[in-house]
Image (cartoon, rainbow, N blue to C red):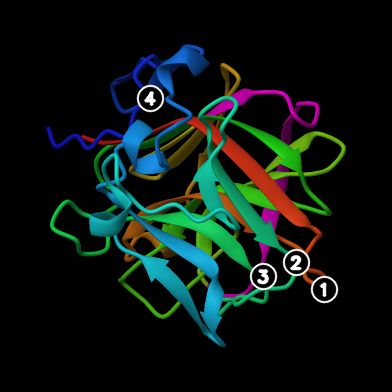
Amino acid sequence: MNRRTLLAAALSTSVAGSLGAVGTSQASAAALDPSLPPGGNFDLSIWALQLPTGSPGKPDTIPPSRLKGASGYSNSSFFWTDKNDGSMTFWAPEKGVTTPNSKYARSELREMNPNGSGADWALAGNHTLSAQLRVVSVTKNVAVGQVKLGSGGTSTKPLAELYYRPNGDIFFGTQNSPDASGQTLHRVGNVALGVKWTYVINVSGNRLRLTLNGTPTSYTIPAAFSPYRQYFKAGSYNQSSSESTSNGAKVKFYSLTVRHG
């Protein structure tokens, strides 16, 4: 079994079988050192950071080699450690540099392989993204976790996205097909703004499973996605745009774990 784990010290996560029977305990803020950059509290060796800065269509990207460790990258504007609770904090304004296929700015981690190449795994197997987080500000909508399409076809759509809205509603958006046919939105819970919550996204074969604060839901992955490989994303992918650099979405992570088996 190949395991790559990004874990705050006090969080324990277990994944059993292809069902992804996952239990997530509450992380202790005491396990996070507010004096360290995010890479000092989290193993960022399997992530690259996409920022809302750079040139049009080419946002700045920070590789794992610059993120990891106690002297790793920190940016007080878009990606930093909260000095009060040690959380890994992402800020994405409504105005910022975007990727070529999106009109929304992001401060978001992109899953990588240990050798520095982009993660690109098949649906077969057992793939799990787990997090504890809280959203402290959002204008319209923010994606805090994604399963993104990689190689295998021409589509750049996500297989699934987890959204948080200002009223606390949480939606899981599952892509109907690899083309531009849109998503089906599933309301999966409600958590007040500023309150911690947990999610576990599991991909195994033709099943996509979400566990939100311990409550599981399950979805069938359409056969049209079978040729595609995937990778995880997590952070603040703001889902609104304007000319404002003060409006946007701020998301704080207290734990983040990736496992493949």
Amino acid under disc 3? Tyr
Q: Which mark is residue 8?
A: 4
Magenta-drawn segment? 179-199
Q: Residues within 10 Å of mark 1 (few under 14, many from 20)?
A: few
Cα–Cα span, label 4 and label 3:
29 Å
Place of residue 146 in the rendered image (x, y in percent of width and height, measured from the top left): 51, 51
Cα–Cα span, label 1 and label 4:
35 Å
Place of residue 22 in the rendered image (x, y in percent of width and height, measured from the top left): 41, 19
Looking at marks 1 and 2 on the same chain, the residue that comes earlier in the sequence is marked by 2
Depth check, front residue: 220 or 11: 11
Amino acid under disc 1? Ser
Q: Are marks 1 and 2 in contact (CB under 8 Å)?
A: yes
Depth check, front residue: 128 or 254: 254
Residue 239 to residue 44: above or below: below
Front: mark 3 or 2: 2
Please report the residue visible at 69 percent of the width from the left and 37 percent of the height from the top: 135
Place of residue 124 in the rendered image (x, y in percent of width and height, measured from the top left): 26, 46
